[in-house]
Amino acid sequence: MLNTLITNKTRLKLLLKFFLNSSTQGYLRNLEAEFGESSNAVRLELNRFEEAGLLTASYSGNKKIFQANTNHPLFSDINNILKKVIGIDLIIEKIISCVGDLKEAYLTGEIARGIESNIIDLVLIGNNLDRLYITSLIEKTEKLIHRKIRFIIAAEKEKATLLKQSASLLIWQE
């Protein structure tokens, strides 16, 4: 869907990388390798985003590190659009109702790192969550958003250990 609106592949990858998870950082060579794009294409788009104020830059040695400017007036709008396109808003809406004592929901894996993926990884933190109900909701949601959803249910005491294993993004909290 987004590739219809934004035809530049590099620009789309940068939007996903930086605006889905605002704590994501990157620098030119790293992004070039991750995206499989030429350094010139990545540099041009980074410069455009920085000039527009959508990205901020800082230096670490000789590396120019970029990060989303969360103070930009359009940041939350871009973030919400990306969540809707990926389907996170539908997943959370469907899961929260009637699943039990859900405390928090985290997005993990590739998408939490800002990398386009057909798989959405979720960590659901809570007590006495109805696994069968969640599974049925997940199956229905997968058909709606045309993506695979993997989930883990964990107690609050397991949260710290579980979230250390990969990038995570809090997407819902009681």
Image (cartoon, helix red, strand yellow):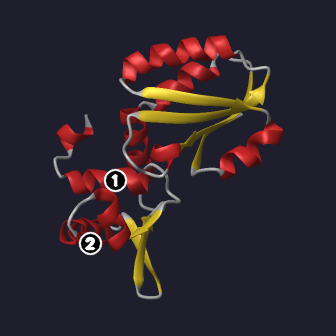
State which quarter of the image contains the N terminus. Answer: top left
**Mark 1 Cα-neighbour bin, 10 Å: few <14, some 14–19, many ≥20:** many
- Seen at 59% across and 29% down, the residue is 151
Q: Which mark is residue 47?
A: 2
Can I make out residue 127 in this image?
Answer: yes
Q: Nearer the viewer, residue 82 or 72?
A: 82
Can I make out residue 74 in this image?
Answer: no
Residue 169, percent across and down?
Answer: 57, 47
Q: Nearer the viewer, residue 18 or 135?
A: 135
Residue 124, percent across and down?
Answer: 66, 32
Q: Which mark is residue 155?
A: none
**Residue at the disc numbered 1:** 15
Q: Earlier in the sequence, mark 2 or mark 1?
A: 1
Q: Secondary structure at mark 2?
A: helix
Which of the 4 image quadrants contains residue 152?
top right
How far apart are labels 2 and 1 at the CA level?
A: 13 Å
* 48 sits to left or right of 16: left
Q: Nearer the viewer, residue 35 or 45?
A: 35
Q: Is residue 132 depicted above or below 81 in this figure?
A: above
